[in-house]
């Protein structure tokens, strides 16, 4: 009786321990059940893949080749990749590397077939690799097989933000585009730490045949989180606006010597700004009068103010009755310091841009709308309205906002537009007799944005961010 009771207790004990050892759908099933002791004659501790091949053996996923080697430099076939993926999937799902494929075996079939059928039944693969199973696997094909082998719970995207920004910069993983076979699966391997590429820029080499050593590295990172990698990429450098000039932010215009319309004057103004000049020499028919010169000057100044990020808000004019009209742009009270003001403004804007990217406040996966809101917040948090500013105050240009943290509406708007243009966001200005604000195209839609009024209270008022034209009109007509 005692022996029978003991046997029953043992049976119950075994039943209770099975779930602990093999829980369904658990990374706890990834345990090293064996100890490597030199089973592969071609594996040296100096090998870059040593830890990975050892792990592959100890997790019970490979016993190597029949000749006692692992075959580090040998190619891996598509069918062999599928076998490994099937084992990993089964180990995670059942606690046994072979349980999944065991229900799909048949006499005379190729070794990979039951694993393929298992992965197909699990929805990991379809028939897209038919005809390639005995061919050497490319790295792109490996990515396709592995990307869906484990669910996100078992293989989280720990590098998601970094990889998204790096890839969007087009300075990393440059050999993978949307035209690369299985490019989404390739990026999944980077996001999950299964791959970081083969060089400093993360090149994946998607068309290259994979070796068994390189494949072992990917496979073991699937099952062992401690082996997963994070790329050592400086994405801040990839997004730096260093080297950008104010002149480069203006679409080049065509010089028109005698502009007769606002559009023609805009062309000539843009020509001047894009050549980093502040002087526009025009040539009209003889007989220029002071009234005509004043009209030209006022039209030019009105257009220049739509490019308020350029720091110009005044103009002087000289003319002759022979037809010459020379316009020289500056900023009130700037004098000869205008160029140094412009240089400091540009340098400050670049520093703000780079810091926001470096801190993660700006990310490559953001929409233009989201980026514009980040800059709206930055402007409102880093400036106060200069109630003491007169008509000739430097507070009327963006230099003042960046230099001393105070401005009036055209200084606010100029600084904000400059930051938006560093992101390639199309923007200009809207104004009435007493106020000026931003008109920006965000993700294809035009919005009115008033940073000045957004900063008019004790807290940031986002009512004035991304207004529709009708909303904007209800606050300030133009």
Image (cartoon, rainbow, N blue to C red):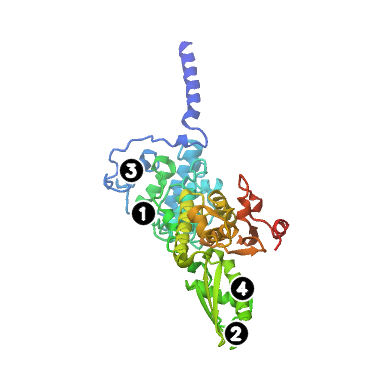
**Mark 3 sits on what residue?**
51
Badge 1 vs badge 2, beta-carbon distance below 8 Å: no
In space, the residues marked 2 and 3 are separated at their CA atoms by 84 Å
Work out whether mark 1 precedes mark 2 in sequence or the reverse, and give the earlier one. 1
Badge 4 vs badge 2, beta-carbon distance below 8 Å: no
Work out whether mark 1 precedes mark 4 in sequence or the reverse, and give the earlier one. 1
In space, the residues marked 1 and 3 are separated at their CA atoms by 16 Å
In space, the residues marked 4 and 3 are separated at their CA atoms by 74 Å
Mark number displayed over residue 298: 4
Q: Nearer the viewer, mark 2 or mark 3?
A: 2
Mark number displayed over residue 211: 1
Give the SS element for disc 3: helix
Residue 276 image point, x, y percent: 47, 71
**Mark 2 sits on what residue?**
288
How many residues crowd around disc 2 within 10 Å: few (fewer than 14), some, or many (20 or more)?
some
Asked whether residue 146 appears in the rendered view, the answer is no
Badge 1 vs badge 4, beta-carbon distance below 8 Å: no
| Residue 435 in the figure: left or right of residue 136 | right
Residue 36 image point, x, y percent: 31, 38
């Amino acid at each position: 009786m005692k022996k029978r009771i003991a046997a029953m207790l043992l049976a119950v004990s075994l039943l209770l321990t099975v779930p602990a050892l093999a829980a369904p759908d658990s990374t706890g099933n990834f345990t090293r059940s064996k100890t490597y002791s030199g089973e592969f004659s071609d594996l040296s501790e100096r090998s870059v893949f040593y830890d990975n091949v050892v792990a592959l053996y100890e997790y019970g996923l490979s016993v190597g080749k029949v000749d006692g080697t692992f075959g580090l430099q040998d190619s891996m076939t598509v069918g062999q990749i599928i076998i490994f993926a099937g084992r990993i999937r089964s180990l995670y799902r059942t606690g046994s590397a072979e349980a999944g494929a065991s229900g799909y075996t048949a006499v005379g079939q190729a070794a990979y077939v039951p694993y393929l059928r298992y992965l197909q039944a699990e929805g990991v693969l379809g028939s897209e690799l038919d005809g390639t199973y005995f061919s050497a696997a490319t790295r792109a094909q490996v990515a396709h097989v592995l990307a869906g082998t484990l669910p996100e719970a078992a293989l989280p995207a720990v590098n998601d933000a970094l990889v998204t920004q790096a890839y969007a910069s087009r300075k990393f993983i440059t050999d993978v585009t949307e035209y690369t076979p299985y490019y989404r699966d390739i990026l999944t391997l980077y996001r999950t730490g299964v791959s970081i590429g083969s060089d400093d820029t993360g090149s994946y080499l998607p068309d290259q045949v994979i070796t068994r050593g390189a494949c072992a590295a990917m496979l073991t990172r699937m099952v062992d989180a401690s082996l997963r990698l994070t790329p050592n990429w400086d994405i801040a450098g990839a997004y730096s606006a260093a080297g950008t000039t104010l002149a480069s932010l203006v679409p080049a215009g065509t010089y028109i010597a005698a502009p007769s319309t606002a559009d023609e004057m805009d062309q000539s103004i843009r020509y001047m700004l894009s050549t980093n000049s502040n002087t526009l020499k025009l040539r009209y028919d003889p007989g220029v009068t002071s009234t005509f010169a004043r009209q030209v000057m006022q039209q030019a100044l009105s257009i220049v103010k739509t490019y308020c990020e350029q720091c110009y808000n005044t103009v002087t004019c000289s003319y002759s009755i022979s037809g010459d009209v020379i316009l020289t742009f500056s900023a009130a009270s700037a004098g000869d310091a205008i160029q140094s003001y412009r240089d400091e403004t540009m340098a400050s804007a670049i520093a703000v841009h780079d810091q926001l990217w470096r801190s993660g406040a700006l990310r490559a996966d953001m929409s233009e709308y989201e980026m514009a809101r980040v800059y709206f917040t930055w402007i409102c948090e880093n400036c106060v309205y200069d109630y003491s500013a007169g008509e000739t105050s430097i507070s009327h240009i963006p230099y003042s906002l960046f230099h001393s943290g105070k401005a009036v509406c055209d200084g606010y708007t100029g600084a904000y537009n400059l930051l938006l243009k560093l992101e390639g966001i199309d923007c200009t200005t809207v104004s009435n007799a007493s106020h000026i604000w931003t008109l920006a195209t965000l993700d294809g839609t035009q919005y009115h944005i008033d940073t000045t009024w957004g900063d008019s209270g004790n807290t940031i008022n986002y009512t004035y961010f991304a207004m529709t034209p009708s909303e904007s009109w209800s606050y300030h007509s133009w």
